[in-house]
Amino acid sequence: MVNERAEGIRVERLLIAALRGFCAGVVRAIDVVEKALETCDGPVYVRKEIIHNRYVVDELRHKGAIFVEEIEQVPDGAWLIFSAHGISPAVRLAARQKRLRTIDATCPLVTKVHMEVIRYSRAGFTIVFIGHRNHDEAIGTLGEAPQSICLVGSKEEAESVRIPDPDKVVYLTQTTLSVDDTREIVEVLRRRFPKLTIPPKDDICYATQNRQDAVKALAPHVDALLVLGAPNSSNSLRLCEVAAARNLPAHLIETAADIRMEWLQNVRILGLTASASAPEVLVRQVIDFARERLGVTEIEEFETVSEDVHFTLPNELIGAMNEKRRAVG
């Protein structure tokens, strides 16, 4: 029976993006923490949120992971996992000085950008990094070559950035940016610096692109969109922006409890997607909400493209797992 609070709401159908939720980098990061908890002797610490999702972090904390903000909070010699967003060399140095046994859960696609920063810096380039100030991924990337890199987060900043040698400038991007926003910034940079070097491969990750494309395809078929994610998750915010650019009302929620009834006035077909760091259990909760609170009976998946990407575990974790097997066997 429809709850009294849903009176006046006439949502008939829930259309869910079939391509949604965890990407390969997030799956890997969560696996790293869970397997480390099973493998490592002593407490396992994690620097920062392993991914930007409170539900996931709380689940891992319940299993025994200890989350800290900085290296100084970790006892000397303990196990420490670096989050999926990447870290700067200064953080690695601090971990070595405390003799920490580290496991790096950085997404391989983020690591790729770090390697490009190092390569271009050594070649004498100024690197324009297109990203969001104070985001964990941007902080880690900028730390690789602070003397050679500058952060640009908007077209306005691209118009004003100063480059010592306009003939030796390259742009790189945060992996979770909107493709459309990045394109506009790159156009400004190309106009200002005709010899701008283009990275060999687009740094915006496949999962970010695919989930944004799924929202673009879904947009004409729904009256409003719910985006499961987190307010500090760049890829979650970008999904909302992609919808807004198509005049589709989009609302970021962390759980079904965040849904506000006023959003659903005059909505007949409601759309739903989940960011690359949002677990499927939260999608199930929204589906239950739609059935029980809104009386929705038509629930369908909207198909676009599929993904089949997998990343291997970090070598240091594989080594620890092998050591434990040998000790037990």
Image (tube, rainbow, N blue to C red):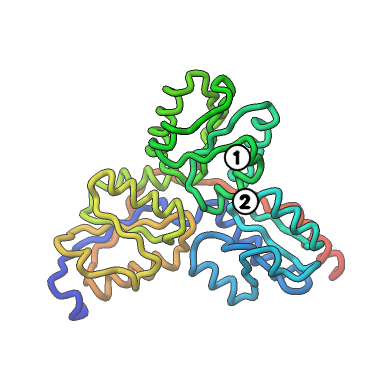
Count of marks overlaid on the render? 2
| In this picture, residue 154 sits left or right of residue 69 | left
Q: Are discs 1 and 2 less than 8 Å apart at CB?
A: yes
Q: Residue at x 64, y 72 (%)?
A: 66
Would you say residue 1 is visible in this rendering?
Answer: no
- The local crowd at label 2, few if under 14, some if 14 to 19, many if 20 or more residues have their Cα within 10 Å, is many
Where in the figure is residue 9, as x and y percent of width and height?
A: 16, 69
Q: Residue at x 54, y 22 (%)?
A: 166
Amino acid type assigned to the residue bearing label 1 in the image:
Val
Q: Residue at x 46, y 61 (%)?
A: 278
What residue is pinned by disc 2? Answer: 86
Instruction: Give above or below for 77 relative to 206.
Output: below
Where in the figure is residue 257, as x and y percent of width and height?
A: 34, 73
Q: Distance between the residues labelled 1 and 2?
A: 10 Å
Where in the figure is residue 253, as x and y percent of width and height?
A: 36, 64
Would you say residue 75 is visible in this rendering?
Answer: yes
Question: Considering the numbered disc 1 on the image, is that residue within a helix, a strand or a loop?
Answer: helix
Where in the figure is residue 131, as x and y percent of width and height?
A: 49, 43
Amino acid type assigned to the residue bearing label 2 in the image:
Gly
Instruction: Give above or below for 180 relative to 32.
Output: above
**Numbered tag placed on residue 305 in the rendering:** none
Of residues 123 and 313, the one drawn nearer to the viewer in this rendering: 123
Task: Pick whichever of labels 1 and 2 is earlier in the sequence.
Answer: 2
Q: Assign the C terminus to one quadrant of the image.
A: bottom right
What residue is pinned by disc 1? Answer: 113
